Image (cartoon, rainbow, N blue to C red):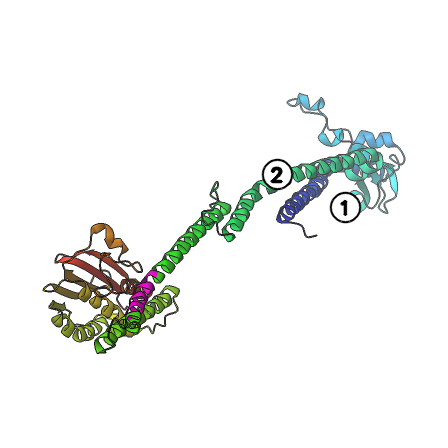
Amino acid sequence: MRPNVTAKLFLTMLASCALVVLIHGLAGRIAFQRGFMDYLNEQGVQRMQEILPRLRQEWREQGGWQRLQGDLSALGVLMRPAAPSSDDADALRVPPLSDQTGAIFRMALLHPDYRLVTGNPEAGARSILLPVEIDGATVGWLAMVPFEQALIAGDVRFYEAQLRAWWIIGICSVLLAAVLAGLLARALLRPLRSVTHAVRRLAEGDFATRVPVSTRDELGVLAQSFNLLAQGLGRNESARRSLMADVSHELRTPLAVMRADLEAMQDGISPVNAEALAALHQQVGQLGQLVDDLHELSLTDAGTLAYRHEPIDLAAVVRASVAGMAARFEAAGLAFQADVPAQPLRLVGDEQRLQQLLANLLNNALRYTDRGGQVRLHGERGDAHWLRLTLEDSAPGVAEDKLSHLFERFYRADASRNRSSGGSGLGLAICRNIVEAHGGRITATASPLGGLCITVELPEAA
């Protein structure tokens, strides 16, 4: 059975704490032995250096160590602290630190071959040694047993007590770390459990699920990201349902008309002539256009529509599109005016898609502008390296509260318009996707001419 995340996190923190306790204990012991012990030994060495001149004097007077041989009291006389001066009367009452830690009892005098003259019998070649030199020749050694050697040899129980205390402290520290690790693991994983339960509800279709955001750390960011995801999925689900309802509605209308016409022909109510067939052909054409628009919109929504980005002149694209539409505006009784600069408007984009963008915008103005009105198209180089196209038309206008919805699929500002005067309601949605695919933006505002003003801004080529 594999451990869960809580167990893994608990074991990780527990192991980390135990390792820290172990390292801290070992480091403390090493620091004590190499720090404090060395300090005590250094105090003893300083005391030995004070004794060396007296030993040299003893050798010169006696010609050897005969007087000190085996006489510990005579060596003790040489090791006495120097008499304090008149201005340091308190020194007599305070022995040196080395004497207080027993350094003089760990000292011994050795022959040049390390044989004992007098002093601590444990002193030898491995002790701390200072040479007693006379005229450059070593006549003996002043030795001192290291403090740690004397401690272990003299009182093993103290060392064992310290070792037991260290183990008790270490075990208590690990137990405390285990308790803290368990509490911390539970506290850290509580938000993750909330996210896990929320993901399960989201997978079951509850798009209203939200995770409470109680912190500002990474877990809080995770909760916020989940809420944004749930919100986006909710919007997408709502849009999907709306799309299905709109598509079924839009398909039902031409199919119902075609069915009625065909049934009338079958029942002999309507004659089968060129006029009736032309009406059916018109309905089929509108149905085909709706299907094409739906396919085009699905491609632009998914980002799978092929774009060939290359340097082009937007002014030339506008002039070509206007030339193909001028006759249609004239036939519809609309005054059309295009104002495009003579100098190139350079950008990087897909010429075919930009032509589709202009065709949709011009067709929209043509379809929804009253006869006798006017349409104006203006192109210019805007601020901060943006190219701007502005298309204005005359009445009828669009209410202020409806302008922001014009680029939604199947949306019509005038619900009374039918398919004979209006389109599928997808043209402006496709325009928005094409503009955004080029890194631009498209907006709708009220036109000074009394109708609608569509503004397209595209980034200029560097």
Q: Which residue is mark 1?
A: 135
* Residue 205 x, y percent position in the rendering: 48, 52
Do we see residue 279 in this rendering?
yes
The reply, left or right, for residue 428 in relation to residue 338 is right
Q: Is residue 260 magenta?
A: yes
Seen as rendered, the residue at the extreme bottom is 274
The reply, left or right, for residue 346 in relation to residue 11 is left
Residue type of the residue flagged with mark 1: Asp
Do we see residue 381 in this rendering?
no
Q: Quadrant of the C terminus?
A: bottom left
Q: Which residue is mark 2?
A: 183
Vertically, is 405 above or below 122?
below
Q: Residue at x 17, y 56 (%)?
A: 397
* Residue 367 x, y percent position in the rendering: 19, 65
Main secondary structure along the magenta-highlighted residues: helix
The reply, left or right, for residue 61 in relation to residue 286 is right
Mark earlier in primary sequence (2, 1): 1
